[in-house]
Image (spheres, grey):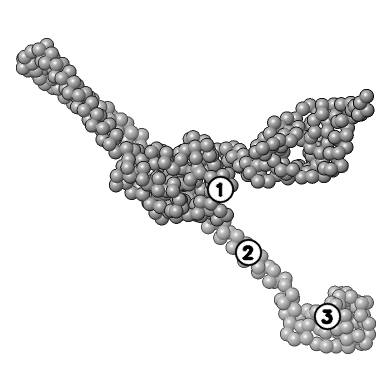
Amino acid sequence: MNSQHIFTVSEVNAGIRSLLEQRFSWLSVSGEITNLRRPYSGHLYFTLKDDQAQLKAVLFKMQQRYLEQQPADGLEVICHGRLTVYEPRGDYQLIVDTIDFHGTGALRAAFEQLKKKLAGEGLFDACHKKKLPLVPGHITLVTSPKGAAVHDFIRIARRRFPGIRIAVYPVAVQGEDAAREIAGAIEQLNRVFPTEIIVLCRGGGSIEDLQAFNDEHLARVIFNSDIPVVSAIGHEIDFTIADFVSDLRAPTPSAAAELIVPDRESLRGIVNGLQQRLVRTQQRRIDRLSDKLALYQHKIGDLSTFLAELFLRVDQLSMRLVHAIQNLIIDNQQKIDRMLLRLERQNPCHRLEAAQARVTELENRIVRAMQQVLATRDRKLAQQSQLLEAVGPRNTLARGYAVVRDIKTGKLVTDSSRINPGDQARIFLDRGSLDVTIDRCRTENMFTSIKKPTGE
């Protein structure tokens, strides 16, 4: 009897889970994200793949807050986490803790982000695209002179239109300084070197190789260029930011030569065909006009009699018109003369002269009245001045009166009771002054002493 232990499915899945979690408790896995989906729970389910295999992975909602950016299909990432088995389905998967965005995936994300930004600003709009000349006289290739793409372009362009002028502005088309050199070349061509078309030329490569043409500054320089810019970068499946902002995008450098440079033999055939069509069209038009002219001549017949009558009619009408104009001028002149006569009668200058005379008369009357008033005021002023002079202090002093001032207080003395014997006083006369010492004070004044009898 077989004694080998028979495992259940659950036991097998549990054992595998234990082994995986012990062996791969923490690991980092690089790969490209595919089949990304987010169900209602908010968790992210996706598959990591490389060229030979794939691995299922899940990033729970709580861990997503630590992400630098949102995962997307096509991004190259490094996922850090642990392996486990989902026992109900027997699937093993990577439980992702953090994600590092790097490599081509990060470049692709940056490309999409810049593309969305510049598209929102209108740099890709067709209304800004400049029209290329039908037959350019001078083309400048901004490229590396060592690449095969530049030689393919020149070979095809000169085969299609021999003698066309093509210049090469050498720049780096790959590396850290490539975008700066390409932008500087476009700006220099706009400032100094006359050319009709600028072609950004480069062969194919990976997204890292074409990264110089995904530069934001370069995109804005292309957009601001006064010279039309054609992008001929990579292969037909390669797209860069320069392709979207350029005035024309060619799938390859060879295709750019065919799009820009017309085939001279084809143009010659087109010109010859147009010339023949023009000759035929003009000949048919001349024939139609000749037929119409012959028909009109037949209908009109002899015009000499008709023209003579017409000339006589014109002369009669001209004479009538001249007489009518002369009569109208005479009537208008008479009306003007009558109006001038009425205007002269009502000329405001006459009224103005009368008013001016009235104003002059009033001015004279005002002057005379003012002179009389001023003379009267002068006489009154002289009388008042004489009266004031008569009662003034100087005349009073001249009549024998004096002014007494207390030397100590400096006040006028008008009452004998306000000064005491022994005080000093200054008496002001009409001429000069006297300093005196008071010997006695009396109450009677000059008027009371004059009224007393003489014998007293």
Residue that carries the numbered disc 2 in the rendered image: 381
Q: Earlier in the sequence, mark 1 or mark 2?
A: 1
Q: Position of residue 104 (x, y in %)?
A: 63, 44
Q: Position of residue 456 (x, y in %)?
A: 92, 81
Q: In the visual, does 345 lie left or right of 206?
A: left
Q: In the visual, does 55 lie left or right of 129?
A: right
Quarter containing the N terminus: top right
Tell me whether the residue at label 3 lies in contact with that at label 2, contact meaning CB atoms closer than 8 angstroms.
Answer: no
Q: Residues within 10 Å of mark 1 (few under 14, many from 20)?
A: some
Tell me whether the residue at label 1 lies in contact with that at label 2, contact meaning CB atoms closer than 8 angstroms.
Answer: no
Q: In the visual, does 132 lie left or right of 242?
A: left
Q: Position of residue 172 (x, y in %)?
A: 50, 54
Q: Secondary structure at mark 1?
A: loop
Q: Residue at x 13, y 22 (%)?
A: 319
Q: Residue at x 85, y 26 (%)?
A: 88
Marks 3 and 1, how far apart at CA: 125 Å
Mark number, residue 404: 3
The residue type indicated by label 3 comes to Val
Residue that carries the numbered disc 1 in the rendered image: 209
Residue 58 sits above or below residue 433 on the image: above
Q: Residue at x 62, y 41 (%)?
A: 108
Mark number, residue 359: none
Q: Quadrant of residue 377?
A: bottom right
Q: In the visual, does 50 lie left or right of 88?
A: left
| 155 vs 351, nearest the viewer | 155
Residue 219 sits above or below residue 91 on the image: below
Q: Quadrant of residue 336?
A: top left
Q: Quadrant of residue 401?
A: bottom right
The residue type indicated by label 2 comes to Leu
Marks 3 and 2, how far apart at CA: 32 Å
The residue type indicated by label 1 comes to Asp
Q: Position of residue 25 (x, y in %)?
A: 84, 43
